[in-house]
Amino acid sequence: MKKKRIHSEQTEKFREQLGQLSLKRINNLVDFVAGHPESLADLFALIDDPDPRVNWRAAWACKYLGLRNPELLLPYREELIGKACRYTQPGIRREVLSLLYNLPVSEPFPVMLFDLCLERMLAPDETVAIQALCIKMAYRLSLVQPELLPELALYLENADPTLYQKGTMATLHKTRLLVQKKLKPNR
């Protein structure tokens, strides 16, 4: 199914800005949206743009906006979780997961996001960046629901180190130690 382009005057302006790779352009766009929050919907819609350069850069801009003004993206949290689950393009998935990682954990508990993290954190076909983000996100989520810590510990302990790159293994090892520390009874 071919994605449809979203047409509004502001969306077209954003699409034009995102057409060229430039951190300065991204920062200018983030500054604009931070000052005009009503335009966030136009930027957010471009994450679904059919042009891979535009959709990745829109996700990148939203990630920076989320770092500066996370409250602006809170209403989009459920939609972001859906995008993280749906997208297979690593650049967009990484940006969306980074954005979600920097938002406060939602109520009700985001089961779909936790499941995605467990699925992708040790998927050998996934990028190291996404594996590491998913490991850290699963740990962060399990801190909100401590009954999930033993399940996360099992996943981390059963990972075959021969299947993963050093970046994934370093994050896995560090997280495994944090989980073990949380699971130890207080003495």
Image (tube, helix red, strand yellow):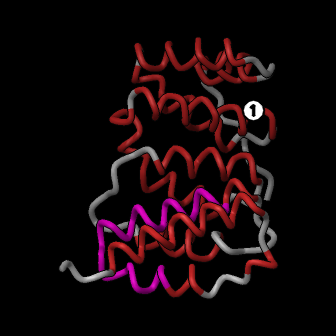
Measured as percent of width and height from the top left, residue 134 is found at: 57, 63
- Name the chief secondary structure element in magenta: helix
Measured as percent of width and height from the top left, residue 10 is found at: 58, 18
Q: Amino acid at mark 1?
A: Val
* In the image: residue 170, left or right of residue 118: right
Q: Quadrant of residue 141?
A: bottom left
Residue 79 vertical placement versus 126 (above, below): above
Q: Quadrant of residue 164?
A: bottom right
Measured as percent of width and height from the top left, residue 166 is found at: 75, 62
Q: Quadrant of residue 110?
A: bottom left
- Counting labels gives 1
x 40%, y 23%: residue: 37
* Between 167 and 143, the one nearer to me in the picture: 167
* In the image: residue 38, left or right of residue 154: left
Measured as percent of width and height from the top left, residue 8 is found at: 60, 24
x 72%, y 38%: residue: 56
Q: The magenta stretch spans which residues?
A: 131-153
Q: Verify whether residue 47 appears in magenta.
A: no
At mark 1, the secondary structure is helix
Q: Residue furthest front?
A: 187
Please identify the quadrant where the N terminus is shown. Answer: bottom right
